[in-house]
């Protein structure tokens, strides 16, 4: 009986076996990666495992409980606890026991990165990651990669110092090829929150901790290719591999049933461009609407081809529209939230250039595509999402929002404009230094007015005064001077309320509901969408510290449930019912308090 | 003084209590819902709105007190005709009612003629002591916030025990407790409750009384 159970369990984890480094990319683009042999890395302990994601990927059975049994732990460690045998090891003739060397070849992919001097991607790419491979389940393919598996020759350190580094070399921190446990847990937390709110993102499958707080952080997504994988070939004028990569990507999208209507012939390239323009327009809008700081730049790094977030190193979500925040990356400052749109648009423009190059065989100047019609698709997608989002934040349902966009677009846009005036208002203190960069404080918390104004309309049935409006809106960042009500601001307050009122009236009339009933339903939805307790980058850092202190006291299943519960609390969809325990308890309660305290920050 | 004590249960079980409550109020009253905790309160608020919607009441706002709020909204809340204190963790709720000063504001609200209703934890807080939240062992609120001062709002001279089940398990601990207090303890199964209209007290549904170690059926 014992043997039968053991065999059954082994069978249920057999999909892990496919994660041996092999990936179809290797056959399509043999020059697109550096292949590494890998060996077992001892002393690892699984600290986090995403049971829900593992079920989706078919790695564990659907009815698996949220506990890590010995068999599963062994499987995770056998699959992912690896370290590459890199150029330093070979140069120094390091010997490793044969039985510890894996049979497969693991790839560190090459892609463009602006921090590399060469600017053409000849020496850049996965500096401390390798791809574990691909799994297919229920018609979907998942890419899996691990961060912290040793120093590759594509790291910025190797490029800068023109030498190979030993994995874990303490003299070179970022270039040492290791990742840390806090990065892994922060990424797991943040990505699960975004996933709950339907923001495209890679997700953390597992975190394995080693000595000194080092870790291997394993992430998965249906496709881990970034625009920068493509742009590298464009920069190097390598038309053949470029075409192969585009075709490979399109085929993957087809197989994953994302692009089922994509034509087979050359029409596929037009389809590809249109889909990308829609995706990046939508994504740039979501980032702006949800105050997500994701460092987009011309290299197309830090983002996936489907607009998903990758690499959480500099990812933040602000509590307010701190649109002047810039991350300080030692020798350069990042883009700001407001610049993200232009950067995303430029990525699409680069793809237009790239497809034209594939089709014509001639690489034209990128400026030739400044007015390309596909950029209109990007602009429309961006605008549509902006309009839908403002109505969503006001509390309108999808049906009501569709009606208003179709019939009251002008009114919606006017409201957006006046909303933006308050959202973008900045402190008179000017530029200030923050923990990891610079910023100019936003002074008004829009979520507060969106949540409170409908309540006051229910009770008063009339507009509120200018000073009340500012009192509700002002954040802890606002000084007395910032809150001054001059003639223009007074005019904007009046306009905000007039337009707000009008939009509700129009929607109520169309829904054949009393104003009273309509504003009540709006107020209920707006309370969820604009919840006071929304996570920020600051709060994530503090929560991660708490979670790390907990890791020796709690099982992997408990840590998973904590993160899952936390992400559920952060679900801002008013149509969904969070699946949670009735009462907030223990650590989740503490997380909740931390989020409340840091709700306006960076 | 107008008060309504709800034990709990589904909206259809509380229909009679709601009807009695609305007899105390003006037509189309303004109602405020104060949740015991902002965590997940929108779900419970949705149920509350549905419950009162059946009585054609739509002027309802949700007012969590364990998150920052402005005086502007608080003033509107205190102008309500009915304020409802929700169920939840009694200790946590009391802590925040005190911390925000709402406990005194609500006392003044009742004095001015406002109708205060409470369900489960909310109802317990309206009495002199919240000790009934601490038993029976198998169904008590956790005092995670370590609240030592267990004084409630003290509107009535009885104690309230919600979600009561007529069983030996419950009776054993309630009888024991009733020996330690001079006040009668009214234990209400879900769907039943108590309406207080100044000097008049009305029991709705089945209500049990525990006093000096004895159990009686009130209604």
Image: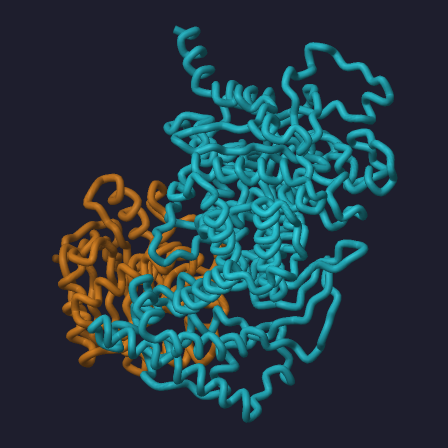
Chain colours: A cyan, B orange
Q: Quadrant of the C terminus of chain A?
A: bottom right
Residue A96 vertical position relative to residue A536 in the rendered view, above or below: above
Can you tell which quarter of the image residue B79 is in? bottom left
**Going 20% across and 58% down the picture, which residue do you hit?**
B11
Q: Residue at x 85, y 22 (%)?
A: A91
Counting from the top left corner in percent of width and height, residue A433 is at 75, 66
Q: Is residue A217 left or right of residue A257?
A: right
Residue in front for this viewpoint, A165 or A517: A165
- Which residue is at 15% across, 62% downward? B15
Above or below — where is B215 with respect to A212?
Answer: below
Q: Position of residue A423 (x, y in %)?
A: 54, 73
- Measured as percent of width and height from the top left, residue A78 is found at 60, 20
Q: Is residue B126 above or below residue A114?
A: below
B196 or B81: nearer the eye? Answer: B81
Q: How many numbered circles are shown? A: 0
| Residue A170 in sight from this viewpoint | yes
Query: Residue at 34% across / 75% down in the picture?
Result: A408
Where residue A56 sits, quadrant-wise, is top left
A1 in relation to A57, above or below = above
Looking at the image, which is closer to me, B57 or A178? A178
Looking at the picture, how far across and down is residue A486, in whole percent? 57, 91
Residue sitting nearer the eye, A496 or A210? A496
- Image quarter where the N terminus of chain A lies is top left
Residue A193 in sight: no
């Amino acid at each position: 009986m014992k043997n039968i159970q053991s065999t059954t369990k082994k069978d249920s984890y057999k999909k892990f076996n496919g994660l041996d480094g092999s990936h179809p990319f290797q056959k399509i683009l043999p020059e697109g990666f550096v292949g590494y042999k890998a060996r077992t890395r001892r002393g690892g302990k699984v600290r986090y495992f995403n049971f829900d994601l593992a079920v989706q990927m078919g790695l564990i059975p659907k009815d698996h409980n949220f506990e890590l049994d010995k068999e599963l732990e062994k499987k995770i460690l056998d699959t992912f606890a690896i370290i590459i045998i890199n150029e330093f090891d070979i140069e120094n003739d390091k010997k490793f026991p044969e039985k510890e060397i894996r049979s497969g070849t693991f790839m560190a992919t090459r892609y463009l990165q602006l921090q590399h001097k060469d600017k053409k991607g000849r020496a850049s790419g996965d500096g401390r990651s390798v791809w574990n491979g691909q799994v297919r389940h229920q018609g979907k393919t998942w890419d899996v990669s691990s961060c912290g598996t040793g120093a590759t020759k594509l790291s910025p350190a190797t490029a800068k110092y023109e030498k190979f580094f030993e994995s874990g070399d303490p003299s070179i921190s970022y270039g040492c090829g290791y990742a840390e446990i806090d990065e892994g847990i922060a990424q797991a937390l943040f990505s699960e929150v975004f996933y709950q709110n339907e923001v495209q993102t890679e997700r953390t499958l597992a975190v394995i901790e080693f000595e000194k707080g080092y870790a291997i952080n394993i992430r998965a997504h249906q496709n881990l290719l970034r625009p920068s994988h493509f742009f590298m070939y464009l920069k190097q004028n390598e038309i053949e591999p470029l075409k192969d990569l585009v075709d490979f990507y399109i085929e993957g999208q087809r197989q994953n049933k994302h692009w089922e209507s994509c034509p087979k012939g050359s029409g596929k390239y037009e389809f590809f461009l249109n889909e990308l323009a829609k995706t990046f327009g939508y994504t740039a809008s979501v980032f702006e609407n949800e105050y997500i700081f994701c460092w987009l730049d011309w290299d197309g790094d830090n983002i996936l081809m489907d607009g998903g977030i990758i690499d959480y190193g500099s990812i933040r979500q602000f509590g307010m529209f701190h649109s002047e925040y810039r991350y300080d990356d030692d020798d350069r400052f990042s883009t700001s939230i407001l610049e993200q749109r232009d950067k995303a648009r430029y990525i699409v423009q680069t793809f237009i250039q790239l497809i034209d190059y594939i089709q014509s065989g001639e690489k034209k100047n990128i400026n030739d595509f400044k007015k390309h019609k596909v950029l209109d698709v990007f602009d429309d997608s961006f605008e549509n999402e902006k309009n839908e989002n403002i109505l969503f934040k006001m509390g309108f349902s999808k049906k009501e929002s569709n009606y208003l966009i179709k019939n009251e677009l002008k009114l919606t846009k006017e409201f957006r404009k006046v909303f933006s005036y308050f959202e973008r208002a900045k402190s008179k203190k000017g530029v200030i230094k923050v923990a990891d960069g610079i910023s100019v404080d936003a002074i008004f918390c829009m979520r507060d007015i969106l949540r409170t104004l409908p309540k006051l309309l229910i009770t008063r049935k009339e507009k509120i005064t200018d000073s009340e409006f500012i009192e509700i809106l002002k954040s802890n960042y606002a000084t007395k001077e910032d809150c001054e009500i001059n003639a223009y601001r007074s005019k904007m307050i009046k306009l905000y309320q007039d337009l707000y009122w009008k939009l509700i009236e129009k929607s109520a009339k169309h829904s054949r509901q009393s104003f009273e009933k309509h504003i009540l339903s709006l107020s209920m939805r707006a309370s969820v969408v604009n919840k006071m307790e929304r996570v920020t980058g600051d709060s994530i850092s503090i929560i991660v510290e708490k979670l790390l202190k907990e890791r020796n006291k709690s099982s992997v299943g408990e840590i998973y449930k904590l993160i899952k519960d936390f992400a559920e609390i952060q679900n801002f969809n008013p149509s969904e019912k969070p699946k949670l325990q009735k009462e907030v308890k223990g650590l989740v309660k503490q997380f909740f308090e931390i989020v409340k305290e840091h709700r306006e920050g960076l | 003084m107008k008060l309504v004590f709800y034990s709990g249960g589904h909206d259809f079980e509380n229909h009679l209590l709601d009807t009695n409550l609305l007899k105390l109020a003006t037509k189309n009253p303004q109602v405020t819902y104060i949740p015991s905790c902002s965590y997940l309160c929108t779900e419970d608020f949705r149920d509350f709105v549905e419950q009162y919607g059946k009585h054609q009441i739509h002027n309802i706002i949700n007012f969590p007190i364990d998150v920052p709020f402005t005086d502007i909204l608080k003033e509107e809340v205190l102008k309500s005709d009915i304020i409802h204190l929700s169920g939840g963790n009694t200790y946590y709720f009391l802590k925040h009612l005190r911390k925000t000063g709402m406990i005194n504001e609500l006392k003044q609200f009742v004095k001015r003629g406002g109708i205060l209703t409470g369900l489960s934890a909310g109802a317990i807080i309206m009495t002199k002591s919240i000790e009934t939240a601490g038993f029976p062992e198998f169904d008590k609120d956790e005092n995670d916030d370590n609240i030592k001062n267990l004084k409630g709002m003290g509107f009535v001279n009885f104690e309230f025990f919600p979600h009561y089940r007529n069983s030996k398990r419950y009776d054993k601990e309630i009888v024991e407790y009733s020996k330690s207090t001079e006040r009668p303890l009214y234990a209400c199964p879900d769907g039943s409750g108590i309406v207080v209209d100044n000097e008049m007290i009305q029991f709705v549904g089945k209500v049990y009384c525990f006093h000096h170690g004895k159990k009686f059926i009130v209604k």
